[in-house]
Amino acid sequence: MEEKYILSTTDTNHQSGYEQIAKELGGSWDGEELLINNSWLEVKANSICFLEDMFIDIFNLYSKKPILVKYSPDDEKHFIIVRIGFTGSFYSKEQTKKFTNLGVFIYNSSQKFELEFPVDAHCQWITLRFSLELFNSFNTPNPDYKLKTLFDNKSPWLQYFSLDVEIENHVKTIIANVEKDKRRHITFFSRSADIMGAIIEKMEKESSKIKTNIHPEDLKAMMQLKDTYLSDFSEQPNLTELSEEYGMSVSKLNRIFKSIFDQPVLQFYNQMKVEEVHRQISYTDKSLTEIAFDLNFSHIAHMSKVFKKYYGFPPSDLRDKK
């Protein structure tokens, strides 16, 4: 098995991790941009600091061997982290993506968090990190909404949302401006504020029970399961094989997965799949028949039925609007 590269860092001082891997892997870090291009790893990351306690990062990674990043809790600082996995941009109907790390993960710096990235897959995400003190400075006294209550909880917790079109469009705007020196900083800041506003609304409408006291190994395993085995929409995941892979019964696998993602494995996978239909209709010129074929629906009528049940209107309506 290929030797795994392991990086240990904290979410409250993650830029020191950038400096470390630049030195270890022959890259460069200038305080805002990380570049690595060696025999097995390609990385391009931008990290901008605002108001001393707010960091907005874009990270692109392709690796030929496993990478594990361990974020350890910080007892001195209390930060909130919003990590948004993103597919990148679609350019043509021929382009297919075998890997997607879609999703919005929100957790605090008390939560031990590990990420293991898949081999031979392009990963892209943005991360917002900010101190609780800074967040509170932007709010009126005693605001009454769920996200503020969650942020004030300093015990370990995690909240997950699927990536909707509104938040993804804000992410796309941030990425589109990463090379534009004159507007990059203001775009990063303003769109990040828009993302937080959208998350506040999602929290009010969609949030279920907050995930607390998640065992770090369970979190790591279910994150890996999601990103590695639930990312290829051309093949339905096999629960029996997954249960053998993770050394537990199917019922236990579903129970642990649901404790983090609110749904059992196949229900979660099917929701991501129908959201991918929406995404490909919105961002590509592929026909509905091509999308149905690429995403392994039995036929276009099946895809349309599932889509309408989830969104309340058929996919043809979305295509007509486009």
Image: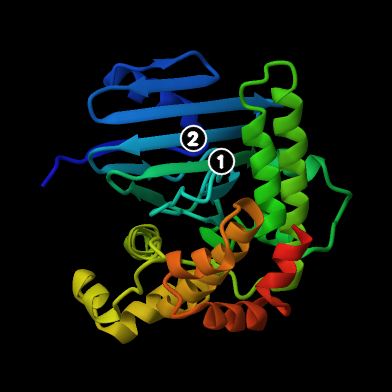
Give residue 229's position: percent from left, percent from top: 33, 64
Q: In which quarter of the image is the C terminus?
A: bottom right
Is the residue under label 1 in contact with that under label 2 (CB below 8 Å)? yes
How far, Cα to Cα, is label 2 from label 1? 6 Å
Disc 1: CA contacts within 10 A as few (<14), some (14-19) or many (>=20) = many
The disc placed on residue 310 is none
Reply above or below: 295 against 136. Answer: below
Residue 145 in view (yes/no):
yes
Q: Which amino acid does label 1 sit on?
A: Ile
Which residue is under mark 1? 126
Q: Residue at x 65, y 43 (%)?
A: 171
Disc 2: CA contacts within 10 A as few (<14), some (14-19) or many (>=20) = some
Q: Which residue is drawn at 45% across and 45% down?
A: 73
Residue 131 in view (yes/no):
no
Which residue is under mark 2? 59
| Residue 242 placement: quadrant | bottom left
Give residue 290's position: percent from left, percent from top: 50, 64
Q: Residue furthest right?
A: 140
| Residue 193 placement: quadrant | top right
